[in-house]
Image: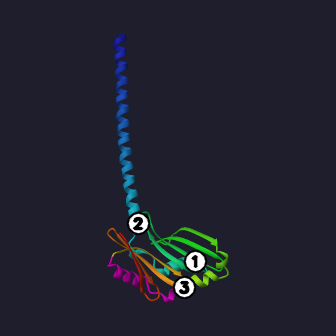
């Protein structure tokens, strides 16, 4: 009788162990699938962020409007379009008489990512930087024209970024193009459209 009872208890224990093991294996399998699904969604989202269509990007006029709305009575001194694996965004810098302001916004929505301000150096205050470094937008060639001229100089390629800034009294477009594994940066006079420099990085 005792032997039969022990056998029954042992069978029950073995059955419970088998059920527990089966449950753990099933749960682990589901977790792996869920993880893979999450990773896939993340990759798709990241790809979507990093591959913004150039046609959907904010215009130069809209970028300026966003900056001036946040920082009125300022002058923009540089704008840069940056593309990376996580996002495509604009970095905008501007000044008033005594302060420098920086703003990072999503390139397609205009949503603010970060913003900052800091005091100018003593030799840049009292309107010095504002007078010397402000970009005169009415006197420059358009972005489309700058990109086309850069492609003519580089032998085509897709737009990978650009910047507009003033240095030593001269305003420049710098257009970054990508053709396969080849990266080309073309610097142009923003007023005349003349190609000043071409730098290739294989």
Q: Pick whichever, 161 or 32, lies toward us.
A: 161
Judged left or right of residue 102, residue 159 is left
Label 3, label 2: how far apart the Cα atoms are = 34 Å
Residue 197 among those drawn in magenta? no
Pointer 1 with pointer 2, Cβ within 8 A? no
Q: State which mark lies toward you, 3 or 2.
A: 3
User: Dot 2 surroundings within 10 Å: few (below 14), some, or many (20 or more)?
Assistant: some
In magenta, the rendered stretch is 136-156
Q: CA distance from mark 1 to mark 2?
A: 26 Å
Q: In the rendered structure, which disc, 3 or 2, sits on the residue that comes first in sequence?
A: 2
Q: Between disc 1 and disc 3, whose residue precedes?
A: 1
Q: Residue drawn at (35%, 18%), measured in percent from left and top?
A: 8
The reply to whether the C-beta atoms of the residues labelled 3 and 2 are less than 8 Å apart is no
Q: Secondary structure at mark 3?
A: loop
Q: Is residue 109 left or right of residue 2?
A: right
Q: Main secondary structure of the magenta part?
A: helix
Residue 199 location, x and y as percent? 40, 75
- Residue 42, by quadrant, is bottom left
Say which quarter of the image contains residue 74.
bottom right
């Amino acid at each position: 009788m005792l032997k039969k009872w022990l056998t029954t208890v042992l069978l029950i224990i073995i059955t419970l162990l088998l059920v527990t093991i089966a449950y753990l294996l099933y749960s682990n399998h589901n977790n792996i699938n869920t993880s893979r699904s999450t990773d896939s969604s993340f990759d798709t989202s990241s790809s979507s962020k990093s591959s913004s269509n150039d046609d959907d990007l904010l215009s130069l006029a809209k970028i300026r409007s966003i900056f001036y709305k946040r920082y009125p009575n300022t002058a923009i001194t540089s704008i840069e379009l940056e593309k990376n694996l996580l996002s495509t965004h604009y970095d905008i810098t501007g000044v008033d008489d005594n302060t420098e302001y920086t703003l990072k916004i999503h390139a397609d929505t205009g949503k603010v990512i970060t913003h900052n301000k800091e005091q100018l150096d003593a030799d840049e205050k009292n309107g010095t930087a504002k007078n010397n470094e402000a970009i005169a937008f009415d006197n420059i060639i358009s972005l489309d024209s700058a990109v086309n001229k850069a492609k003519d100089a580089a032998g085509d390629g897709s737009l990978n970024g650009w910047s507009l800034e003033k240095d030593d009294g001269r305003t420049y477009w710098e257009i970054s193009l990508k053709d396969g594994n080849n990266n080309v940066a073309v610097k142009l006079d923003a007023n005349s459209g003349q190609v000043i420099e071409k730098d290739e990085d294989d």
